[in-house]
Amino acid sequence: MCTMTEEFLRKVFTSLKDMVSALSAFGDVRSVVVFGSAARLKDFVKDISDIDVLVITRKRPRIPHYGFEVHGAEVSITIMSLDDVRKIFESGHPLAFMLYKYTKVLVDDGTFSTLISTIKPKVTERTLRILRHSTFVALGLGLEKYFAQLYREAISHAYHAVRHMVRYKACLKGVDANNFPISDDEVKSFLPEYAKGVFEKLVELRRRKIGKEDCMNALEDSRKLISSEMGCCIPSFRDLEQRILEENGHIVSVMLEEKTCSVEVSCIVRVDSCYRTLVLKCNNK
């Protein structure tokens, strides 16, 4: 018996297959594969997870990215030439590990199956650099979404931040393509015991509507976990929020600086009858 999520994904995949003829406009299509959480039924969350699709063509496309909706789901299509896909495998880009382990093949003339059977991605300096950077970017986006009162999206970004961090740490420990942690269960298995509950809470919260306080609690727990595991000291998000409240500011953007672990917030504040931009930088020095 199919679950509602399974039935939903089946409808999306069928529609994508029906669109293959239209995809020929991108070039000589060799393979169309779904990756990311949509290729892992247990991890997919309707209304929050995107449908990520890779289209492999013979030649490099003029426009490499497209986005549209299918049955209410956001579909993100990446179009790459076979040579470029081969390069991401050889360079150790994190995407290569996702493609190597979990995909749903919609169309393949043998190009994709041959690729993953002949090239096994390896952890490189590029792998580590991208995963570390992605950890801080995702956590910063989580805080930005929190200030925008988009609490479920904030949790989703924090969830991704912890996943990036776990993959980074796993790479430092010498994982190969076969045991590179992709799924939620795999990510959890790499976490120390004290941290498993934090990740489990993120997984649970992103599946439902949540309020402000639950969101901040989860963001703070994620911040502390990432600080501990990455050997840095990201400043308190609660303290930063208090400073913004004192300034009566309206958030414009949030940036979490990877090298210094400082948080920089740009906000609009009213001074007398005028508005001005205020930049708050919070660190632990």
Image (tube, rainbow, N blue to C red):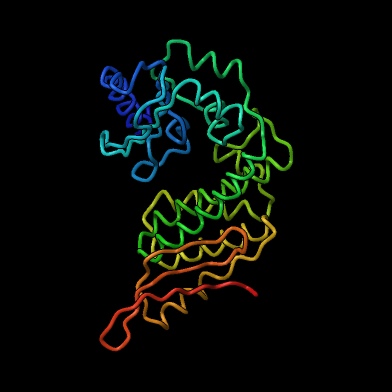
What count of labels does the image hold?
0
Residue 181: x percent and y percent?
Answer: 61, 37
Q: Residue furthest right?
A: 173
Could you tell me which quadrant the C terminus lies in?
bottom right
Residue 121: x percent and y percent?
Answer: 62, 27
Which image quadrant is residue 221 in?
A: bottom right
Task: Residue 126: tell me if it is visible.
Answer: yes
Relative depth, front residue between 154 and 54: 54
Residue at 64%, 54% in the rendered image:
195
Residue at 57%, 55% in the rendered image:
198
Which image quadrant is residue 171 in?
A: top right
Residue 78: x percent and y percent?
Answer: 40, 31
Could you tell me which quadrant the N terminus lies in?
top left
For residue 52, above or below residue 172: above
On screen, residue 113 versus residue 269, left or right, reads right
Residue 247: x percent and y percent?
Answer: 40, 82
Residue at 54%, 49% in the rendered image:
134
Task: Residue 5: tell me if it is visible.
Answer: no
On screen, residue 202 versus residue 4, left or right, reads right
Which image quadrant is residue 88 in?
A: top right
Residue at 57%, 67% in the rendered image:
262
Relative depth, front residue between 60 and 82: 60
Q: Residue furthest bottom?
A: 272
